[in-house]
Image (spheres, rainbow, N blue to C red):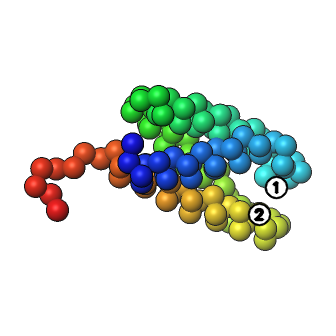
Amino acid sequence: MSRSRTTGILILGILSLVDLAGPLLTDGDNPPMAVAVVGSVLGLISLVSIVLMYRGNERAIIPLVICRVISALTAVPAFFIGGVPAGVIVLCVGIVVFTAIGVRLVTVAAAPVEAGAR
């Protein structure tokens, strides 16, 4: 496994753990409990996908990327809803940015290199 893919998996794994702990960290309002539970399920599926990838299942990248993108999208409403604390907005920005970085590192490492490409 390449260094960039390993870094991407590490980033997405940390985000998955944060999602998994979501229901324990929410006050019920920011994020709403329903969003925290959905995030927790996405985090669990992501962690299972990561384990499968380390065991050599390359196809596990698909559910990993899908779950992480959906999880990041659940953070987007915080930018448009009033009354969200500034700390939560900063956390949401970090989730979206690190998800983009992690997905990029994982998918670029998975792309085949063309013969003769520079």
Q: Position of residue 33 (x, y in %)?
A: 81, 43
The percent coordinates of residue 86 (x first, y second) are 78, 71
Query: Residue 109: where, in percent of width, then height?
Result: 35, 49
Tell whether 9 sits left or right of 57. Answer: right
Q: Image height check: is 97 above or below 17?
A: below
User: What secondary structure is marked by label 1?
Assistant: loop
Quarter of the figure that contains the C terminus: bottom left
The residue lying furthest to the left in this view is 116
Report if the CB atoms under discs 1 and 2 are less than 8 Å apart: yes
- Residue at the spot 63% in from the left edge and 38% down from the top edge: 42
**Local crowd at mark 2 within 10 Å, few (<14), some, or many (≥20)?**
some
Q: What residue is shown with label 1? A: 30
Q: Is residue 77 left or right of residue 53?
A: right
* Residue for badge 2: 88
Q: Which of these two is toward me, 44 or 52?
A: 52
In the image, what residue occupies the spot 35% across and 52% down? 108
Count up the numbered dots: 2
Q: Residue furthest right?
A: 27
Which quadrant of the figure has residue 77? bottom right
Give amino acid for label 2: Val
Closer to the chain start, of discs 1 and 2, is 1
